[in-house]
Amino acid sequence: MRNKDGLSPGDIHALSMLDATAQKALVTNKSVHNETLFFCAQEKISAFNPAFNAVTHTDFSLAEAALNNSSGDTVLLPYLLKGSDEYSGFPMQCGSRLRKDATGTAIHPFMEALTANGVLPVGMTAMPEFGLLASGESLLYGPSKNPWLTSHSALGSSTGAAIAVATGMTPYAHASDAAGSIRMPASACGVVGFKPSAGFNLRARRFDMIDDYLCTDSLLARSVRDVIDATNFTRPPSLQKVTLTTEPVHVGVIRQGLGNVEASSAVGIALEEHIALLRSMPGVTVETCAAPYDLDALQKALQTLWCYLGGGIVDGVAAQGFTTSDVLEPWPHYLHQRRASLSDTALREAFHAITVAKLQLEEFHRKVDIVLSPVVADLPPPLGFLAPDIDGETLWNRLFAFMAFTPIQNLLGAPSITLPVYQHQSGLPVGMLLSAAPAQDDRLLSFASQVEACAPAYAKWQPQGHQGE
């Protein structure tokens, strides 16, 4: 890729930190050559990836071919695939030593829609093994580091994606979310992370019953308007494009997470700042509410499904004749072990608890438009706290206490978004988590856009801004 505009390193950083909408506008009005956007991505990845370990593979060949064949009618933008994505010719490692040499052989509709709209893959990002943990510290890649405080986790499982967008490597990065894997790293890195309602995005992977039930896909971005653009071209054809509205909004604050976990004092302070911001907005009312569903029953349901996910991976690897301990981390083995202790009715009980909670949520949203809650129970922890090779029971207890808020929307099929509107004194961002009733994605995105417009200016990441300790 060529620096066709002769940009200095400072100019490259400034351009790369603009959102996708602003970058496209510069190309449209001929202020910047389209190829320069890809040059910036190449330069930023080369310069900063060694410090953060976010990108595991680069390949600009598709972008180069598209630029050479472009008529100039469509502005092309770079994005990064998540490590679990299948894309023909790209690695498909899923953060696992089992798949370190695997290559994708298909392209799914979600990625096809991106290409059709001029958003082109230029590489892959780091993630925990098979997305089963909330921190990107796989034994295959090593730990990925939070760009705001490199001794701490960037969370996960879309770990590298959030780091890449936060540091300006690319304006977009694909992310998937089965229990908070879009929203947790978005919060930790200070970017916008949107989880659509179940069924509100094109297929992005092969069929899997539990994964399909829990998981949705989106692009991490630096602004709500970018998320809306990406949403418009990754929705199924049966759904209309996002319609933004302005109407009075009643916000319910739910402070408890799964297992009745409450957030730490640091996150609690951030939550109060979020509440104050919402109360300052015209047409917005805010009240504290009790969770309308059984938080203990939903936590048990999530844990049951997680055991089936991890246990199924171990079963599949063993069926291929591998010695599973040679190619899989300890964590899936621990989930496999816990699955063996589940009752014969555990899965049925899990789905029953979810069904009951969906009905309770529907009734709750007759009075409350938007839910505000913490994203996670504490600040992003030091690296190692959620590492895959610590004692299984310790990791189990830490993980489900930490990610106690975001899985609720996965279990119930609801849309949810985290916005970067607060920064802790340590430098670590703390996102605002907003959620709506299932299928009310447009209302949620409308409100998120209004919140973003009212929020104080949020400090962008700077190369000299990250700390080592």
Image: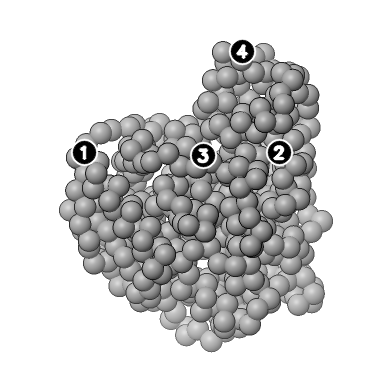
Mark 3 sits on what residue?
Answer: 222
Q: Callout 3: helix, strand or loop?
A: loop
Mark 2 sits on what residue?
Answer: 44
* Label 2 crowd bin: few (<14), some (14–19), many (20+), radius 10 Å: many
Task: Give the label on residue 30, or none.
Answer: 4
Q: Quadrant of residue 149?
A: bottom right
- Residue at the spot 58% in from the left edge and 49% down from the top edge: 162
Return the disc, 2 or 3, that comes first in the chain's sequence: 2
Q: Nearer the viewer, residue 37 or 361?
A: 37
* Label 4 crowd bin: few (<14), some (14–19), many (20+), radius 10 Å: few
The alpha-carbon separation of the residues under discs 4 and 2 comes to 22 Å
Q: Callout 4: helix, strand or loop?
A: loop
- Residue at the spot 61% in from the left edge and 81% down from the top edge: 392
Q: Disc 1 marks which amino acid? A: Pro
Question: x%, y% of residue 306?
Answer: 53, 71
Return the disc, 3 or 1, that comes first in the chain's sequence: 3
The alpha-carbon separation of the residues under discs 2 and 3 comes to 16 Å
Return the disc, 1 or 2, that comes first in the chain's sequence: 2
Mark 1 sits on what residue?
Answer: 282
Q: Disc 4 marks which amino acid? A: Lys
The alpha-carbon separation of the residues under discs 1 and 4 comes to 38 Å
Question: x%, y% of residue 166?
Answer: 58, 44
Question: Exactly how many numbered labels are in the figure?
Answer: 4
- Residue at the spot 67% in from the left edge and 13% down from the top edge: 71
The alpha-carbon separation of the residues under discs 3 and 1 comes to 25 Å
**Label 3 with label 1: CB-CB less than 8 Å:** no
The alpha-carbon separation of the residues under discs 4 and 3 comes to 23 Å
* Label 1 crowd bin: few (<14), some (14–19), many (20+), radius 10 Å: few
Return the disc, 1 or 4, that comes first in the chain's sequence: 4
